[in-house]
Image (cartoon, grey):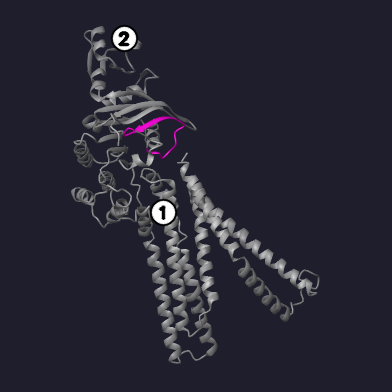
Amino acid sequence: MKGLMYKELFLSKKYRVITLSVYLIMLVMCILVKISSVCGNIANMEGKNMLLNTIFIVMGLALPAVLCGTCFTSQILNDEKCRFRQYSHTLPLTEKQIVGSLYIFNLIMFGIYLLAGWLNYFLACAVFDRNVDLKYLLYIFIIGIMSFTAFCFNSSNSYRFRSAKICTAIIVSVCIIAYLGIGFGFICLMNHYFKKRGYDMFSDDSDKEVPDALMVDFGEDFSKCLRWTGTHFWWLIVLAVAALVFFSFRRSVRALERRGN
Amino acid sequence: MAAYENAIEIKDLTKHFDGFTLDNISFTVPKGSIMGFIGQNGAGKSTTINSLLGIIKPDSGEMKMLGMDAVKDEVTIKRDISAVFDELPFHEQLNARMLSKMLSHIYSTWNNETFFGYLKRFSLPEKKKFAKFSKGMKMKLQIAAALSHSAKLLIMDEATTGLDPVVRSEILDIFMEYLQDENNSILMSSHITSDLEKIADSVTFIDKGKILISGYKDDILDSHGIMKCTKEDYAAVSRDDFISARVTEFGAELLVSDKNACNKKYSGAVIDNATLDDIMVYYVNREKKEWK
């Protein structure tokens, strides 16, 4: 198992170099902007804030997402392409060990990227004189866990279908369905909320703008609702992720056990 | 590991694909020997080897390697076997050092000294990515990896195909060295029968999913022969006495499976020694019986 994990480590070198380079470039940019603003070169306060906020978002949040996203690579399909999958059956390893090595490797990478993401966020807070908000740490974790579960889902498809095209089609379809589903659900929820307060988004006079106060109330209530769900039902999310990882692992092992029939 | 006589024992192995069936094949590879596995493209060589290695699951049949059941004791067996394929099964971004690190954690008997010794012997670079290796280098690398964990059985699928004669000769020498240890055995499928004639102890010939001949190479070459005769003489030869005949305007060449018997029956006929190539070609045309 350890041997296959070494293989993944060597093969992911390219991704690690790319993410580290992106990180360093962003870091240099942040320092330059900071120096520039300290020296008063960015006179316009609004422009300065906008620039700093943009870099903060990129460095503090988007970058960890990129880092976590590197877990989600096409390792299995690469194995298929170079016939390593065929070769792996000649090694003294069981199917569980072959699939397990990949899962453990990605889990370790997820842990490393999570730590890197959090450290990065603390650094960004220090550079831009902001207070650490635990909410952002949670966002970084969520982004990471989404990448990991996406990897698990994709791995079972890769072992099952052994085709990059089919795997891409499945993941794109799932993303589109999830996006449309969430969007539709959100609009329905919003309309239901507004209706209760005497405003119908889909009525004939829907051209009329939604009152600002109503939008603010909705935002606050929605956040409250999310917080309440997160506080009381966080275990449900953990359970769902654990179930997905477990079933993906089992499905991957079974697909590999079919031995290319 | 229990004592065993045959490195490989295959009995009634069957695998059905759409348009092809590996039909109840049986053969054995004696311990300490090298067996050549020959046949034309699509004859079933790779299917047999892939079944043996567990890459595909056969429909039925028994397979034993190193005295153990190939399915039940799969992981144990695989510690002591090595496979070499016609194409490099490693990622092209890797290099020999990375491969050694990887395999040393997979095989408990992996020997870095042996591996790097082979690299030096084959003049293979340690840090160069496999993507930049030539076909010959890739094959040598596979062989170096296969021989660096004290494997008792080497299974090769078209390993020497596409290599130049110099590299092939170098590789054959390595196999001969490997076989100096009488516990080591090789199953080697190849189109290049001249290589097998040089090194194989026994030969198994497969065609259209069926084993046609399996036995010691010298016995097969001794018993088979090419009978050369005129068209008139050919007409007098019983069709049961030859496998198939190549008839040209100058005469006929027939492959006979019992040279001595034919010599007695057709006194005066010229019967030359047959090569494995001849045997393969004439057997493949056995259904036509007569071909040009």
* Depth order, front residue of B112/B1: B1
Q: Give the numbered dot on residue B237.
A: 2
Q: Is residue B32 magenta?
A: no
Q: Identify which residue is drawn at 55% across, 87% down.
A: A46
* Depth order, front residue of A225/B154: A225
Q: Give the numbered dot on residue A101.
A: 1
Can you say whether B18 is above or below A85 in the image? above
Within-10-Å neighbours for mark 2: few <14, some 14–19, many 20+: some
Q: From the image, which quarter does the C terminus of chain B lie in? A: top left
Q: Chain of mark 1?
A: A
Q: Is residue B100 left or right of residue A193?
A: left
x and y percentages locating residue A6 in the rendered image: 35, 57
Three-letter amino acid code at disc 2?
Val
x and y percentages locating residue A136 in the rendered image: 53, 75
Within-10-Å neighbours for mark 1: few <14, some 14–19, many 20+: many
Q: Nearer the viewer, mark 1 or mark 2?
A: 1
The residues colored magenta run: B53-67
Q: Identify which residue is drawn at 47% across, 68% down.
A: A66
Where disc 1 sits, the SS reads helix
Three-letter amino acid code at disc 1?
Ser
Q: Identify which residue is drawn at 34% across, 39% down.
A: B77
Residue B58 is at least partly visible in this image: yes
Q: Is residue B55 magenta?
A: yes
Instruction: Report the Cα–Cα distance between label 1 and label 2.
Output: 65 Å
Q: Chain of mark 2?
A: B
The answer to whether marks 1 and 2 sit on the same chain is no
